[in-house]
Image (tube, rainbow, N blue to C red):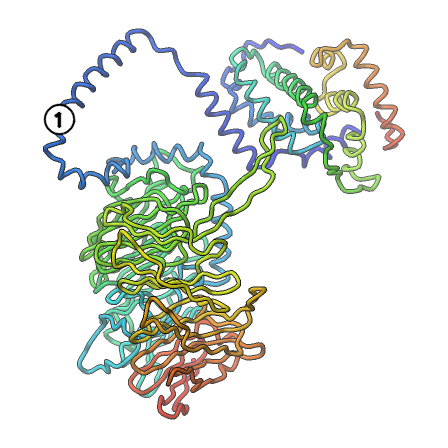
């Protein structure tokens, strides 16, 4: 992850521009982590309110992306540990039953994984980060990430019967 | 494979547009806060110096104000309406704020659904000012009085005498003019022998949503929202001096959707709501945020100094009020006000527009004084509650009276740690009557009438106000307004059902047209007409009532659909029963309603948009498909003409 880039234009770091470019990415990670669209809405806003405070220090495109993802992880961590999440039971807004071949089925199965596994899966397969990069993002050791990824794959192999995991 | 499927499955997961816009505007405002430059010291010094100067000048002005205290009332409007703006930049600076404010929420979806409504029921969307037809009754208002013409004819059921309202059927005693909503045709019919003089005058370019028309002398004015999706309201003036070949004279165009209009003499006052497309506003392109008017002597954006801004606009919309002289197609005056309006009352001297603000649960009332086409914005005020229709407003002797239904929402919150969640919303509803003076300052009011009910009809008659509220039974309130500072409720009569419209019917009588309802459940049972005895305001009585077999009538949704002719003692309207549509006529004799006449209108569809008019001793029933002529003596069919 090369975070410095000399050709980088600071305009791209402006919160508005970052929002237009990365809002979907953040929203999806937040959704994967919270399993709820409404909570993802909240986190989306919170992420950018935090980002406003640091955007002037951004040094490259990659830096912005990583920073936003890191904030998203932090935000959803603090959200998941809030009183509201701990003491209340979410309405089970499970998505409709999908057949084995549809894409929605994959998402459903990923959502059934424990929080730490599905985060790693998402960052690896959707955002395209390597094990080292995920470790940096999540403030974990690379070996831990490897273990999480391995175990998540084991579970998914059984449920969705994919060979290329 | 897994990667691809996983990415595909996430494609639909993204924040919806509404949330995105909200977050984006929040980000913009927060970034601005973050970026506030730190003021250098010398700037502060200058600011201090300025403050000093200001304080001194204002002290000087205050001492001056005592001398010109009388002028204060005149300048009040400008103070209240914050800015009578002087340039387009002033306007832009205010409109820019809309982009950030919560006012945007829901405005665009709401507008789109409005558009759909317009398609379905063409002209049922107006404030009630738009629909219907009826009689001159005692409203005997100015119209052409040619000695050749038969003056004994009924006219549109106008609210205020001398102020003409638009309709789909008009007559001057000799000819009948009809505008078909379905076929988009304008027809002129000779009333004497029921001969169709002209029917092929298709107004192709305004054919979309043609509403209604006016008749003045040898001129006919059409009002229309133009083609579907158009943001302009177009009026077309026709010269009909040759009844067989009408000639198109002028096109009058102004921004916005049609709200209401009035014709006083040859001056047309047209009121539209111009909905701003807030996301596409460009500073240098004034056409994106300034109302446009096109007519004979004016074309382009209105002047900056005719635009006013309400202190708290209820939406990103303008109310555009224009006056035209229809005989020469010239614009006489125009005023625009940021903030929409739904109900319009017009007397010969004043226009009152009223727009409801959902967030504050208040109605913004604005008074324009009018004289011979000139329009002056005089005052504005917010009053509690919402108005029903144009009959909720009245002017009498320099005082303005309003009957409102006040909804107060009581929200109870439950704090779950993250954000506040609304647990329940209950609405406390009541009705009030408010009297304002000519500066729209409150003089008197009666509050908390009929809790949990809403107003169904209102009629002001001089010193008295009559209004009906309804939930299960129908109390008819009579309020005395002789002393504007101290209005008194004189009586409240409770009967089952409700009246949608109240019409004065000769001395000491008030006619109500509405629905009968079950006393316990409040379910409606059929169209009802009632006659109230108001000769003693302290003891209002229902003298008689007649419950028809019909389920619905146009007369219950618009005042213009009913024929109320006190002189001939006739009450007529079209009505629909389970299997047929009919036109019915009643007489009120010896304290009882008598069904003197009813005729089948052939198809059910024909029972909508029907008007009955009387010329001399003939009755004409005008439907979308035919016009029929009856003798008023024996109700025999004389002639019938299919279009």
Task: Determine the residue located farthest toward the right in the rendered image.
Answer: A158
On the image, which quarter does residue B218 sit in? bottom left
Chain ID, mark 1: B
- Report helix, strand or loop for mark 1: helix
Of residues B560 and B529, which is closer to you in this image?
A: B529
Is residue B251 rendered to the left or right of residue A13? left
Q: Which quadrant holds the N terminus of chain B?
A: top right
The reply to whether residue B297 is in sight is no
Of residues B119 and B432, which is closer to you in this image?
A: B432
Relative to B489, residue B72 above or below: above
Relative to B111, residue B611 above or below: below
Q: Which quadrant holds the C terminus of chain B?
A: bottom left
Q: Identify the residue at image location x=47%, y=65%.
A: B474
On the image, which quarter does residue A121 sit in? top right
Q: Which residue is mark 1?
A: B63
On the image, which quarter does residue B508 sit in? bottom left
Image coordinates of residue B241 in percent, x first then y, are: 23, 74
Is residue B19 rendered to the left or right of residue B190? right
Image coordinates of residue B145 in percent, x first then y, are: 20, 76
Of residues B341 and B435, which is closer to you in this image?
A: B435
Q: Identify the residue at image location x=16%, y=27%.
A: B62
Relative to A53, residue B118 above or below: below
């Amino acid at each position: 992850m090369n975070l410095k880039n000399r050709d980088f234009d600071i305009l791209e770091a402006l919160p508005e521009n970052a929002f237009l470019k990365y809002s979907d990415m953040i929203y999806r990670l937040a959704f994967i982590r919270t399993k709820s669209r409404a909570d993802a809405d909240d986190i989306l806003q919170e992420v950018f309110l935090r980002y406003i405070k640091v955007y002037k220090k951004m040094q490259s495109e990659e830096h912005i992306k990583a920073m936003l993802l890191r904030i998203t992880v932090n935000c959803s961590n603090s959200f998941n540990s809030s009183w509201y999440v701990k003491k209340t039971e979410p309405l089970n807004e499970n998505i409709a039953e999908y057949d084995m071949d549809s894409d929605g089925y994959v998402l459903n199965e990923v959502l059934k994984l424990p929080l730490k596994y599905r985060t790693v899966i998402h960052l690896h397969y959707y955002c395209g980060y390597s094990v080292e990069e995920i470790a940096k993002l999540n403030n974990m050791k690379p070996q831990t990430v490897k273990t999480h990824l391995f175990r998540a794959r084991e579970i998914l192999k059984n449920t969705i019967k994919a060979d290329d995991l | 494979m897994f990667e691809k499927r996983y990415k595909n499955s996430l494609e639909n997961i993204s924040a919806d547009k509404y949330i995105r816009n909200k977050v984006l505007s929040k980000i913009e405002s927060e970034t601005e806060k973050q970026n506030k430059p730190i003021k250098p010291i010398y700037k502060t010094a200058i600011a201090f110096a300025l403050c000093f100067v200001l304080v001194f000048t204002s002290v000087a002005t205050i001492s001056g104000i005592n001398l010109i205290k009388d002028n204060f009332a005149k300048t009040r409007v400008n103070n209240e309406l914050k800015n009578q703006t002087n340039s387009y930049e002033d306007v832009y600076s205010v409109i820019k704020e809309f982009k950030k404010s919560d006012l945007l929420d829901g405005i665009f979806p709401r507008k789109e659904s409005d558009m759909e409504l317009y398609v379905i029921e063409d002209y049922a969307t107006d404030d009630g000012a738009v629909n219907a037809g009826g009689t001159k009754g005692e409203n005997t208002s100015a119209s052409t009085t040619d000695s050749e013409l038969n003056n004994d004819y009924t006219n549109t059921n106008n609210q205020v005498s001398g102020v003409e309202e638009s309709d789909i059927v008009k007559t001057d005693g000799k000819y009948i003019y009809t505008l078909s909503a379905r076929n988009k045709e304008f027809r002129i019919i000779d009333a004497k022998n029921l001969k169709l003089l002209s029917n092929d005058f298709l107004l192709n370019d305004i054919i979309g949503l043609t509403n209604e028309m006016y008749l003045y002398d040898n001129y006919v004015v059409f009002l229309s929202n133009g083609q579907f999706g158009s943001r302009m309201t177009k009026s077309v003036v026709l010269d009909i001096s040759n009844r067989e070949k009408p000639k198109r004279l002028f096109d009058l165009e102004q921004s916005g959707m049609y709200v209401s209009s009035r014709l006083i003499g040859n001056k047309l006052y047209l009121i539209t709501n111009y909905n701003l497309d807030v996301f596409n506003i460009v500073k240098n392109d004034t056409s994106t945020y300034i109302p446009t008017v096109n007519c004979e002597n004016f074309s382009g954006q209105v002047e900056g100094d005719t635009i006013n801004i309400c202190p708290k606009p209820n939406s990103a919309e303008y109310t555009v009020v224009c006056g035209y002289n229809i005989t020469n197609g010239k614009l006489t005056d125009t005023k625009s006000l940021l903030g929409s309006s739904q109900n319009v009352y017009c007397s010969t001297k004043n226009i009152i527009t009223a727009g409801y603000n959902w967030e504050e649960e208040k109605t913004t009332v604005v008074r324009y004084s009018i004289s011979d086409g000139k329009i002056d914005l005089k005052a504005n005020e917010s009053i509690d509650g919402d108005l029903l229709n144009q009959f909720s407003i009245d002017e009498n002797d320099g005082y303005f009276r309003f009957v409102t239904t006040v909804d107060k929402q009581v929200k109870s919150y439950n704090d779950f740690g993250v954000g506040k969640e609304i647990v329940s919303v209950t609405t406390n509803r009541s009705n009030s009557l408010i009297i304002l003076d000519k500066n729209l300052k409150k003089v008197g009011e009666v509050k908390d009438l009929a809790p949990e009910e809403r107003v169904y009809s209102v009629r002001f008659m001089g010193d008295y106000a009559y209004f009906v509220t309804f939930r299960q039974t129908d109390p008819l309130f009579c309020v005395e307004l002789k002393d504007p500072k101290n209005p008194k409720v004189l009586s409240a009569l409770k009967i089952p059902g409700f009246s949608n419209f109240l019409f004065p019917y000769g001395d000491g009588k008030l006619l109500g047209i509405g629905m009968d309802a079950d006393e316990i459940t409040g379910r409606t049972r059929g169209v009802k007409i009632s006659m109230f005895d108001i000769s003693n305001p302290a003891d209002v009585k229902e003298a008689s009532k007649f419950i028809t077999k019909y389920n619905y009538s146009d007369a219950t949704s618009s005042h213009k659909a009913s024929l109320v002719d006190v002189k001939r003692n006739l009450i007529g309207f079209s009505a629909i029963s389970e299997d047929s549509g009919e036109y019915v006529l009643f007489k009120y004799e010896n304290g009882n309603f008598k069904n003197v006449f009813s005729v089948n209108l052939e198809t059910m569809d024909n029972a909508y948009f029907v008007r009955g008019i009387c010329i001399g001793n003939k009755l004409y029933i005008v439907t979308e498909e035919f016009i029929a002529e009856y003798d008023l003596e024996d109700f025999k069919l004389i002639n019938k003409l299919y279009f």
